[in-house]
Each structure stands twice: as C-alpha cells, then as structure tokens.
Image (tube, rainbow, N blue to C red):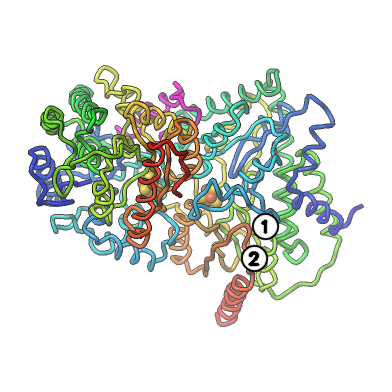
C-alpha cells in the first residue's frame, strides 16, 4: 500500500513524503537482513501483530503489500500468468499468484534488491480462508517455519469470551514462544505495552482523519486517498513513533484543508467541485489505480467512507483502540474485529451507518473477482443498503492485481450511468440499479 | 432380502428429490420433531441426534434444478453450490427446516451464514467454527465451548436439555454408522466391480437425508446384497478422486469416470460421514470426547490446516498405498478456493513419489461429459501402459 508510488509528481504534502520515506526505509531494512542479521516474519494485513513482532526486533513483511506494489508497477500480470503456468488455477486469488510468480522471479523488492526468505510465516488467519492456503503454499516453497494464529470468525456478530480466550491462549502458549525461539529475544510485556500505547495514539488521529470526510466538501477521498492513509497503521508501522508523527502531520494538513474549504487532493491536483458523495465497499483495483480514480474525480465523485479502510482494523465504528493495560486481550480483539472477520449483517449495518453519518448520495460496490472473503454476498448487501437507505446503489466488477479483469470502458460506462441515476434521484425520480 | 438395484433405486429417488420429501414426512409424523440443515464439510451430527433432531445434509441443487433466483445473489466467478442452495431456500424447498448450520469450510459458506441471517431473521442460524489449532488444551478447549454453544442453540430449538447420556447414545449410533460406511468403502476398494462408485455415491447421499439408523440399515443391506451378486470384472485402473468435498459433481460425471476405465477406490465425497476416523468413546464427557476426536482423529481436507509442512499431502500418498490405487484424479468445482489452492501442494507431493495424477474442474450442472470421459480415459490408458512397461 504505497501511495507514494502512485504518482510521484503529485507529492506535495509532507505527510506523503514522510510515508514515502518510511516505506523506502522499511524495504531497505527488509532487503538488508543479510548484513544486519535482523530476522523477518511474514504476516497478513488483517489482524497483523506488528506491535508484537517489534518486541522481538523482527521485521514485518506483508505479502499482500508486495502484491499491491507489483500491481501498481504493472508487473503483477506476468507474475500471475507464470503462477498459472506452473499449475495454479486461474480461479483463485490473484494476490497469491502474484506472490508466487514474484518468488519464481527471485522476489525482487521495489528497491530492486531481493527480498529475504522469511524466518517465520506468521499465519494470522483473520477473515480469509485463502490466508491458510497461501502460507501453506509459501511454506511448501520456502520450507520455513510457520506459526498459525487461528482467529475465529464473528459468526453471530459478537466477540465471545471463548473466542478471545482462544486467541490469547494461542498468543501466550504458541505464538510468543515461537517468536522467542526464532528471534532469540525474550518477550517483554512492557515493551508490548509501550508499542500498544503508540498504536492507540496514532489510531486516534487516524480515526479523526477518516471522520473528516463528514465535512462538506470532504477534505479527503476515503477510498482512493484512503489507501494512502491506512498505509502506516495497517502495516509495519503501527506501534511506532513514526506512525504517531505521520498521523499528526496528516491531521494538521487536513485541518488546514477544512479551514480553507478545500476538497481532496487527486493525482491531478485538488478536486474542485464535490458533486457526489459515495460509500464504497470492496478493495480497489491496483493495476489501473490512477485510471480508476480518474473516473471518479473527473465526475466530481468523492468517496466519503469505504470498507476497505477497515480491512486492517476497525477503529472508527465501535471505537476500538489497542489497550496497553490489556495487551494480549486487546491484540485478540483487534484481530477478531477486522472488517472481513465480521459477519454479513454487521457489514451491512456498518455501511448503513456510514451512509447516514457521512451523508452519502449513493453506495457503490467494487466487487473483486479474486476475493470471496469480500465478494460472496455483496449482491445481497447492495439490495439491503438500497432498501434501508433509499439511496441508489451500483455494482462494478474488477480485480486486485490481475489486469485481465479490469475493463476500463465497461467500468466507466457503469459509473457514468450510475452518476446519472443519482442525479435523477436528486431530481425526484426513483432510482433503478445501474448493474 | 433386497437386491442392490432395489436399494440403489431407492437411494436415487432420494437423491433426485429436491423437495426433501422424506425429511418432510419424517417431521410431519410427529409435531415435536425438528430438522436442522447443514452444509459441507463437517458438523457434529451426534448433538442433533441427541436432541431428537434430524440433521439434513444440503449439497446444493444438483443438475436437475433450474437456478433462476440464485444468480441474482452471486457473481459469475463464485462457485455454484451457494446459488443453488439459495434457490432451494427461495423456492421454499427448505421452509420446513428449523435451523441451518454453516461449517467453516470457506469464505463463501461463511458469508452465506450471514446472508441466511439476513434472509431468515427468526431462524436458528449458526456459523459452526472448528479449531485450526490441534492442541487439546488450546483448540480443544475452544472447541468444547463451541460445541456447548451449539448444544444450547439446539436445546433452544427442541425446548429441552440435551443430556450427556443422550449424546453418548447418539455417539454409539454414529459409531455404528461410520463402521458401516467404512465397510462399504473397504468393500468397494477390494471388489470395485461389485460396488460401482455411482452406487456407493448414492448410498452415501442417502445418509444426508435419512435418519441415521435407517441409513445404517441400508448400508448393511447393500453390503449383503452386493457381496452375493456377481458382476463382470473390467480391466480398469484404480484411482482416487480428490477435491469434491463440497459442491457435488453430476452423477453422470462419476459414471463417466468409471466408464472411461477407472475404478474409484476412494474419494472425498460427503466427508461428514467419514470425518471422525476412529470410534468416539461412548462414556465419560461426550462433548470433550467429540472435541478430542476432531482434534486428533479426523480426516484431512483442504479447509483444515496442516501444521506440519512435511506431512502436507502425505495422507493422500498413504491413501494411494492403502487403497492400492494407481493414480489420483483431482476433480474440483470451478472457483472452489480451498480445493484449487490445495491442489498444487497435493500434486507436488504425489509427483515427488511418482504417483500419476490429472486434474479437471466441474460444476454441479456440468452437462458435457465427453471431455471428462476422454481425459479420464487417456489417464487410465497411460496408467495401464505404464504399469505394463514397468
Ligand atoms: S481472498 Fe481476499 S482477503 Fe483473502 S488474500 Fe485474497 S484478496 Fe486478500
Ligand atoms: S465449492 Fe468450494 S468455494 Fe464453493 S462453497 Fe464449497 S468449498 Fe466453498
């Protein structure tokens, strides 16, 4: 999730520069482990335990982020095809195939240097079955140590004590001892508390940033811009003072934009008129990220809330913060509460609430071919939201990192007719679906 | 005594009946009776049985149901079983069911549990989670509590407590059923010409809709009848079918594989009937016993984590050896994440010990059998040539 890579020339704000540097520095560390001797753990974004990983002086490498990086650099298409040629099905998640295809090419990081073989695959199994298979596949290739952390699904829309106890017990009895063994560093709970304290500070400002979209005009785009804003908190920086500084700076910039009555910044500069306020469900497409975004800002459409900014942790909906006083329990609650680990009725309620609170004109689903975790059930979700809010909803289909599934003309047509539908609705007509 | 044709005709009738008439009749016979539906791959049916509940295995609509509404619920790149299951519900074919269980097999079925909650707010709907941690004091404790929560939910349906004694009795009933299921599988393995795979398939499908005691009797009758009958031995090769644990292929596909020259000597259809590998103790704490059986003695499949990398795929290699198979056919539903993501690892393991394997995809409503027949036929020929040459 390196927004800094999206478009270097638009980087004007210091928060963006900060993030670019943070990411570059992290890749340097990751690709320098042969010299530094630092150990690396690979982990998924949803439910990642960055604060814990840092307690063992280990680096956190996130394979989804590498797939995104390769998607944005237009390299993922070839990697996916290589993986398919080597026997992986065309039907499965393209993040996995981009990762495996990348490995076959020597796993080159964005800085051009080879990625290290992880010392540990931390299988934080939150919100997606594919994760389980993905690390089994990597283990098969790398032969490296794998530690499962099974996070139960919130099937009934609640975190039960049994679920929490189960996650905590795994942390105490398996995950932490494994980290100690791999890293040679003894676990220090006070160090964890300190990291969690840092997380909570950054999370406060992060939530403020997300909620700034309640302003009219919204000073941010919570989807296309949102992927920039989630960067540090969803990845290897949560729990660091760098993340605190980043979000403080970002907040300052947005405060200024609100004071000036400015809209979001796009790759082509500041967005002028805010014509449509949307809530969006589903991850973006990465291979044509800029073209995709342009289809929105050209029409004056701004995303005021997105579910994608909750995939690596939900902080704004029910006020969760990492809690230094209950360190392991709070890590468990964080993992259990990630967006795709919540059941469908909860997801629908969250979207309905966002439609209301952010005064959205419509709801849009970007359905991802790769991702059953997000996508299975979205058509029903769309109808529910339409019925509950009376606002028009639309459905488009793309993929994360497989360019074969991004059809620009198709997506643009759909969006244009959707915006017309919102206009009609405003003019007093009844909405009919654009998909 | 019934012959195999009579037995299989009855099973086929049950299989083709997408209105679940037999389960409906069972329920209508007594107003206090309840039925709980479940999807693949595993639920502890013993708990339902102990509550006097008929557990009803729901495996989609098959190839004789037209899906009209279901497509409005699922994108084209999602497998077929959820849409045909929704179709069953929307067309009121499941309106007699008092609860639905959605096991933890994949994100599609997981999300479907929430869809069901939205569609049927008053119904008992549970996402049934099973542990991926196989330590008794970690995953085991978690699972005991999950089982107890399920038990409480079922008690809510039947309006009474389910006692340990009742569960222990039900465990014994299912131990017996598993014994017979295993006997049928072993019988087919030894004499595949006497127990064609499509017959074994229909026998096991019957177990999805019938009371378990009746199913056990049918299995017993079939074994007796099949042993007594003589059928011609074909020069088929022996294969294991893998990857069909959720969405089911059309019956014709199973027949086609056999007609193309392959005896199926093991498969992963309806794993719920063979999930627990050993007898579960019938005394002591039954919930703990069920949990321990799951943790330490249950089948391996794609939706279950394999903690030991060196063991990945070994169960399949062992099955090939134990069943005297000569190859493996991976047959998975299109868009089935667990099966398709698992396949390269299993294929690697097989290739490492030179076990021939091929793979294809199907959908429950696949109509064209010719390509599959040709592929399976070529595979069978290759195996025969290979074994003659060696
Ligand atoms: S299926 Fe979805 S959540 Fe899972 S790894 Fe792929 S993109 Fe991520
Ligand atoms: S066929 Fe595969 S992907 Fe589809 S519901 Fe079943 S297990 Fe899930």
Q: Residue furthest front?
A: A427
Cβ atoms under marks 1 and 2 closer than 8 Å:
yes
Graded by Cα atoms within 10 Å as few (under 14), some (14 to 19) or many (20 or more), the crowding at tag 2 reads few
Image coordinates of residue B97 in percent, x first then y, are 70, 34
Q: Which residue is mark 1?
A: B63
Image coordinates of residue A334 in percent, x first then y, are 33, 29
Please say whether residue A168 is one of the residues in the magenta stretch: yes
Residue B171 falls left or right of residue A114 = right
Sequence order check, earlier mark of 1 and 2: 1
Please say whether residue B361 is one of the residues in the magenta stretch: no
Span colored in magenta? A149-177
Label annotation for residue B353: none
Image coordinates of residue B26 in percent, x first then y, are 81, 35
Q: Which residue is mark 2?
A: B367
* Mark 2: C-beta under 8 Å from nearest atom of ligand 2: no
Residue A86 falls left or right of residue A327 = right
For the residue labelled by badge 2, is the local secondary structure a helix, a strand or a loop?
A: loop
Residue B175 falls left or right of residue A318 = right
Query: Against A2, is B240 above or below?
Result: below
Residue A51 falls left or right of residue A36 = right
Query: Against A64, is A196 above or below?
Result: above
């Amino acid at each position: 999730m390196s927004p800094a890579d999206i478009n270097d020339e638009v980087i004007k704000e210091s928060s963006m520069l900060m993030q670019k540097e943070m990411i570059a520095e992290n890749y340097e560390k990751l690709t320098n482990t042969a010299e530094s001797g630092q150990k690396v753990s690979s982990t998924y974004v949803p439910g990642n335990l960055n604060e814990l990983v840092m307690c063992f002086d280990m680096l956190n490498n996130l394979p989804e982020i590498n797939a995104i990086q390769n998607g944005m650099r237009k390299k993922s298409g070839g990697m996916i095809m290589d993986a398919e040629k080597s026997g992986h099905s065309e039907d499965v998640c393209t993040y996995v195939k981009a990762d495996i295809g990348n490995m076959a090419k020597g796993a080159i990081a964005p800085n051009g240097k080879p990625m290290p073989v992880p010392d540990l695959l931390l299988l934080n199994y939150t919100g997606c079955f594919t994760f389980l298979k993905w690390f089994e596949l990597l283990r098969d290739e790398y032969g490296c140590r794998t530690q499962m952390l099974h996070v139960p699904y919130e099937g009934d829309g609640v975190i039960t004590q049994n679920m929490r106890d189960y996650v905590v017990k795994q942390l105490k009895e398996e995950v932490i001892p494994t980290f100690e063994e791999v890293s040679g560093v003894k676990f220090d709970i006070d160090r964890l508390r300190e990291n969690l304290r840092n997380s909570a500070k950054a999370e406060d400002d992060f939530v403020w940033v997300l909620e700034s979209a309640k302003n009219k005009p919204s000073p941010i785009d919570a989807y296309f811009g949102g992927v920039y804003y989630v960067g540090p908190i969803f990845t290897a920086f949560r729990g660091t003072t760098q993340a605190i500084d980043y979000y403080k700076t970002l907040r300052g910039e947005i405060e200024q934009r609100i004071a000036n009555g400015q809209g979001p910044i796009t790759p082509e500069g500041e967005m002028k008129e805010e014509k449509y306020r949307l809530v969006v469900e589903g991850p973006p497409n990465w291979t044509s990220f800029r073209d995709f975004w342009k289809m929105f800002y050209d029409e004056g459409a701004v995303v005021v809330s997105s579910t994608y900014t909750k995939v690596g942790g939900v902080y704004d909906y029910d006020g969760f913060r990492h809690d230094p006083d209950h360190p392991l329990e709070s890590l468990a609650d964080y993992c259990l509460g990630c967006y795709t680990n919540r059941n469908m009725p909860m997801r629908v309620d969250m979207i309905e609430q966002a439609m209301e609170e952010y005064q959205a004109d419509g709801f849009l689903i970007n359905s991802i071919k790769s991702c059953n975790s997000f996508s299975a059930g979205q058509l029903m979700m769309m109808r529910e939201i339409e019925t509950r809010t009376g606002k028009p909803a639309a459905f488009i289909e793309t993929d994360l990192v497989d360019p074969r599934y991004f059809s620009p003309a198709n997506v643009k047509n759909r969006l244009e007719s959707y915006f017309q539908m919102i206009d009609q609705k405003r003019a007093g007509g009844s909405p009919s679906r654009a998909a | 005594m019934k012959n195999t044709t009579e037995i299989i005709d009855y099973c086929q009738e049950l299989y083709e009946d997408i209105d679940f008439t037999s389960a409906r009749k069972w329920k209508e016979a007594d107003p206090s009776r309840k039925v709980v539906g479940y999807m693949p791959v595993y639920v502890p049916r013993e708990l339902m049985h102990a509550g006097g509940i008929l557990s009803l295995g729901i495996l989609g609509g098959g190839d004789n149901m037209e899906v009209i509404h279901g497509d409005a619920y699922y994108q084209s790149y999602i497998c077929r079983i959820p849409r045909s299951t929704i179709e069953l519900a929307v067309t009121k074919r499941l309106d007699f069911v008092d609860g639905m269980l959605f096991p933890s097999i994949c994100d599609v079925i997981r999300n479907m549990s929430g869809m069901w909650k939205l569609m049927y707010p008053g119904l008992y709907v549970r996402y049934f989670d099973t542990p991926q941690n196989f330590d008794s004091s970690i995953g085991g404790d978690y699972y005991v509590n999950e089982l107890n929560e399920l038990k409480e939910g079922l008690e809510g349906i039947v309006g009474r407590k389910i006692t340990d004694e009742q569960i222990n009795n039900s465990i014994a009933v299912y131990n017996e059923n598993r014994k017979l299921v295993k006997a049928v599988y072993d019988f087919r393995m030894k004499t595949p010409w006497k127990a064609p795979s499509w017959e074994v398939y229909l026998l096991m499908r019957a177990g999805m809709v019938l009371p378990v005691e009746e199913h056990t009797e049918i299995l017993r009758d079939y074994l007796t009848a099949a042993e007594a009958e003589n059928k011609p031995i074909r020069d088929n090769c022996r294969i294991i079918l893998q990857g069909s644990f959720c969405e089911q292929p059309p019956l014709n596909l199973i027949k086609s594989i056999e007609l193309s020259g392959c005896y199926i000597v093991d498969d992963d259809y309806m794993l719920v009937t063979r999930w627990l590998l050993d007898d579960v103790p019938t005394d002591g704490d039954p919930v703990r016993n069920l949990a321990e059986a799951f943790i330490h003695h249950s089948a391996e499949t794609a939706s279950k984590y394999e903690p030991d990398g060196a063991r990945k795929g070994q169960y399949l290699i062992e099955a090939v050896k134990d069943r005297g198979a000569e190859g493996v056919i991976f047959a998975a539903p299109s868009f089935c994440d667990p099966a398709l993501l698992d396949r390269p690892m299993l294929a690697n393991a097989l290739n490492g010990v030179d076990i021939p394997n091929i793979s294809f995809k199907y959908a429950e409503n696949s109509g064209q059998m010719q390509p599959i027949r040709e592929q399976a036929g070529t595979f069978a020929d290759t195996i025969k040539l290979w074994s003659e040459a060696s």
